[in-house]
Image (cartoon, helix red, strand yellow):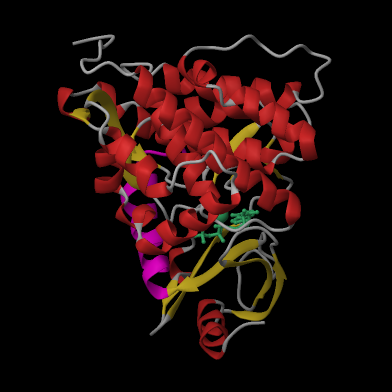
């Protein structure tokens, strides 16, 4: 289960304990556990509250610890993120470990959205947890950038455009049907779009329904490994696309129909007609509409959100899915991105009007 190095780190991190029982958490790519420890000499008693313990490669752990220190302490409310136990966060030659509060009695945001209770936690996510980052962009003019969106995204996250990803996207294109353009062609179309004004700020960088826990309707944000500057529409677009790709309330051809409708360019440029309450996917579509309102309220032109969403669809398409249904959805994500990019390239004027100068 744990490598020799991880075991040594665990023993050092919990050196003041007589035992630690680890329970593996199933989502995510890192090794994350809920840890039940027994303290040796605590003034309170032997049983502390449960910890979360995350092992990953040393550079990733160092990056996440730096992000916690520089970006969360003063800007994310203390009750909307785990607090780290700094004495238990350690870095070895190749591996590191982070430990902090385990969020008890919580569900993933994805599960809460799917069961139709997403409204309050989504509000808490954007107006609470993310508020401290998203508001900065309104305090000074230099947070407004005038550039091509792909160019901004490339500057802020070079790894998203790595050769590895490109190879995966070439494969996806081949699987996605005869009318889809090659990834390089989609990239050229995006690169040729005119510059637009957009607000920049700190973004979570991997906002999805498993990286937000919900306890008593409050959103608690996790996983600060991918924080980066970027357009403020990036986090909403990432959440929008992942809520759709990971939903469990519709499947198969029904999912394809729902996704096809939800990612029409018109629906990405202005609020769409709300779903009818009897629609089986109404809970999901309601949540996605809320997330889009958060994006629409920070952008300066309606062309920004479709571009950023197409990039998030491509990002999802570049990962392998777990199982046939997930694989099919990711192939379809490529088709949806293809449609959005071609249509935006056709519609976008050489000079774009902005909401404010
Ligand atoms: N503090 C915590 N309390 C409760 N559950 C947690 C906590 N931290 C992580 N988890 C659970 O473990 C899962 C994986 O954790 P995390 O998102 O930090 O790692 P990851 O996605 O594997 O990391 P990365 O994206 O850096 O590779 C989360 O989706 C969540 O279900
Ligand atoms: Mg995660």
Residue at 61% in and 76% down = 41
Residue 265 in picture, x, y percent from top left: 50, 21
Q: Closest to the observer: 128 or 59?
A: 59
| Up-down relation of residue 5 to residue 239 (above or below) | below
Marks counted in the figure total 0
Q: Is residue 96 visible?
A: yes
* Identity of the residue furthest to the front in this view: 178
Name the quadrant where ligand 2 sits: bottom right
Left or right: 266 as drawn, with respect to 17: left
Residue 195 in picture, x, y percent from top left: 21, 27
Q: Is residue 129 visible?
A: no
Give the quadrant of residue 276.
top right
| Up-down relation of residue 23 to residue 264 (above or below) | below
Residue at 41% in and 16% down = 297
Q: Is residue 39 magenta?
A: no
Residue at 55% in and 22% down = 264
Residue at 62% in and 82% down = 2
Left or right: 183 as drawn, with respect to 320: left
Residue 120 in picture, x, y percent from top left: 64, 24
Residue 290 in picture, x, y percent from top left: 57, 20
Magenta segment, principal secondary structure? helix
Q: Quadrant of the C terminus?
A: top left
Residue range of the region highlighted in magenta in the rendering: 58-78
Left or right: 342 as drawn, with respect to 50: left
Q: Quadrant of the N terminus?
A: bottom right
């Amino acid at each position: 289960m744990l490598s020799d190095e991880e075991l040594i780190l665990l023993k050092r991190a919990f050196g003041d304990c007589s035992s630690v029982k680890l329970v593996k958490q199933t989502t995510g790519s890192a090794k994350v556990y809920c840890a039940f420890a027994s303290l040796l000499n605590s003034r309170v008693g032997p049983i502390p509250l449960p910890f979360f313990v995350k092992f990953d490669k040393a550079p990733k752990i160092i990056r996440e610890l730096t992000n916690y220190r520089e970006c969360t302490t003063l800007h994310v409310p203390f009750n909307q993120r785990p607090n780290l136990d700094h004495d238990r966060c350690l870095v070895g030659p190749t591996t590191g470990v982070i430990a902090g509060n385990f969020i008890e009695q919580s569900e993933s945001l994805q599960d809460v959205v799917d069961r139709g209770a997403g409204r309050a936690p989504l509000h808490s996510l954007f107006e609470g947890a993310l508020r401290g980052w998203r508001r900065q962009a309104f305090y000074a003019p230099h947070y407004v950038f005038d550039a091509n969106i792909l160019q901004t995204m490339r500057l802020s996250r070079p790894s998203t455009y790595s050769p590895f990803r490109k190879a995966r996207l070439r494969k996806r294109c081949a699987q996605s049907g005869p009318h889809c353009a090659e990834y390089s062609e989609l990239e050229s179309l995006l690169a040729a779009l005119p510059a637009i004004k957009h607000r920049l700020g700190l973004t979570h960088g991997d906002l999805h329904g498993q990286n937000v826990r919900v306890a008593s309707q409050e959103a608690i944000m996790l996983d600060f490994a991918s924080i980066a500057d970027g357009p403020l529409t990036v986090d909403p677009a990432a959440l929008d696309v992942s809520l759709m790709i990971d939903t469990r309330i519709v499947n198969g051809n029904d999912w394809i129909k729902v996704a096809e409708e939800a990612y029409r360019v018109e629906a990405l440029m202005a609020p769409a007609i709300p779903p009818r309450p009897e629609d089986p996917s109404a809970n999901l579509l309601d949540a996605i509409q809320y997330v889009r309102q958060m994006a629409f309220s920070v952008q300066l032109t309606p062309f920004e959100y479709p571009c950023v969403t197409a990039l998030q669809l491509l990002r999802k398409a570049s990962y392998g899915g777990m199982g046939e249904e997930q694989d099919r959805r990711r192939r379809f994500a490529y088709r949806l991105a293809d449609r959005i990019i071609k249509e935006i390239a056709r519609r976008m004027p050489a000079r774009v009007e902005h909401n404010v100068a």
